[in-house]
Image (cartoon, helix red, strand yellow):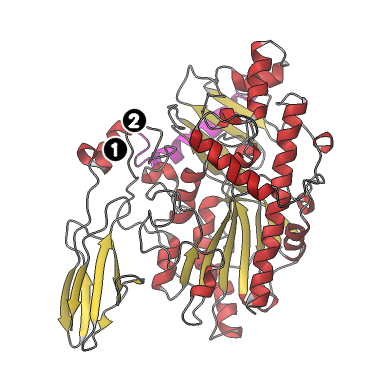
Amino acid sequence: MKIISRFLFVLLAQVIFPDERPNILVIMADDMSLRINALGDKTAITPNLDELVKNGTSYMNAFTTAGVCACSRSALLTGKNQISIGSMHMRTSSGGSVPYLAVPEAHIKAFPEILRKQGYFTFTNDKLDYQFSGIFPGSGPFTIWNSEKDKFGWRNRKNSEPFFGMINLIITHESGIFRGKMNSVDTQAIKLMQQTRQMLYEAPVKPENVIVPPFLPDTPEVRKDIARAYNNIYILDIEVKEIIDQLKKDNILDDTIIIFTSDHGDGLPRYKRELFDTGINVPFIILVPKKFSSWQKPGEKIYDLVSFLDIAPTVLDIAGVSIPSYMDGKSIFGNEKNEYIFAARDRLDSFKGKTRAVRNKDYKFIKNYSLGIVGAQKLSFRENLMSMKELRKMYENNELNEIQKIWLELIPELQLYDLNEDPYEVNNLAYDPNYKEKVLLLENVLEQWIEKNNFHGHLEEEDLIEVFWPENTQPQTTEPLYSLEDGFLHLKNNDVSKDASIGFSYDGKNWEVYSEPIEVKTNKKIYFKAVRYGWKESETKIVKF
């Protein structure tokens, strides 16, 4: 496909539809690899996702920046790799020595907030989890989303302004695979919630029909877990249909660009949390309505490398909004292509570690900076998987073959994989003399990337926390300064909270992002406050006119 330039794409939309900007909807699956029938996985039962593939464009080489959700989502929202904004430890609010939130540089904003400033209504549902927020609605900067609770949040618009939405579908989360006795009360509750939803649907994929990858043992328990992953995707596929049906019902499907993706790979052993393709290669399907898509060839599969960091600039590009220079990604509609993608893994729950990876179309190079640890760390949450228990038992009984043992043993410092010959990444070529030059090349590329982006990644987490929250105390954003000039209220930050986000409200409940002076009306109150990501909100100031 001939990829048109960003300028041409925006110009095309402006010329043909001068008074209209598209709605943009991202449907975000939890924990899902490329298990879509139309993308080549014939075990998957995904008729509705298949329709997206049939009518849209699929980017087959799309990769997250981490194999775990909060780190990945922080990169997605900001367009910055997590190591450059201090959001690389999973998770900041739990699992480490003390809870904290990441504090990106103040000028770095989540792209939905940028869209709000340009007149878009923004919404998400149920889950935040950006590392500079908590997990649940109401726990993050109030300036990012207009609405955080409703799946069909576009219906909360008061006017007909365009919307950007991110709908999170959690049925495919790792917890949906859990069975048996859990190792904590909280996990038991999560498992029961998922099982209650699953009971409403059939489970058409049977264990005997799945393909077991070579790094897992072919046992009944492993097959059952893989089948459950497929059946959760089957349910997710139905939920995708419900979303599309609601867009049709509300007569806005033809005005809405849909992107389907996932925050990282499957919630199975050696998938989620890992920097192998099983952990970071995700679906990326974009469906553009006919009136916007003179460039799109329905059903096309593109093999260019796409990073999760490219989503923010791509969405801004579609909306005709300038892309901030600080963003690491690039619009997929531009002429510049990725030669490499990069990923990182740091602390996972209570287990410290530091791993970096670089990938091109043919090879993956991984460098482990924390030696003396095994790949399959005993993460409490993951240990609830029956397949994980099976792996542990078989390893202890020396029942695994050489490939299946690799992940449970010490990680080598360097790893190199030929992705064409070894898609499961089980044959490490890093110490083969025939690949010495390839190792040196990719290691140099990786180190240059780290040097450029390692704003916080060189610090131990305890030192990072001290930078973000001195003496383990969350800083508070200061109140905005205000002035009244010619009937307009002007708001700005003081030097302490420079570049913090400012919001205002007429009722103290429904907040808008401040972007220009506010016209003052008599007998009206205006509420305003500010927030820097990772800090407490300022006190709310109320001015009556």
**Image quadrant in which you'd find residue 334:** bottom right
Seen from the viewer's position, the closer of residues 213 and 512 is 512
The boundaries of the magenta stretch are: 432-459
- Name the residue beneath numbered marker 1: 465
Q: Is residue 213 visible?
A: no
x and y, in percent, of residue 543 in the image: 18, 76
Quadrant position of the N terminus in the picture = bottom right
Asked if the stretch drawn in magenta spans residue 454, the answer is yes
The circle on residue 97 is 2
x and y, in percent, of residue 187 in the image: 53, 36
x and y, in percent, of residue 385 in the image: 62, 31
**Image quadrant in which you'd find residue 454:** top left
Secondary structure mostly seen in the magenta stretch: helix
Q: Hey, what amino acid is under mark 2? A: Ser
Q: In this view, does 170 lie above or below 297?
A: above
Q: Hey, what amino acid is under mark 1? A: Ile
Q: Is residue 92 above or below residue 300?
A: above
Horizontal side of 386 relative to 6 (left or right) equals right
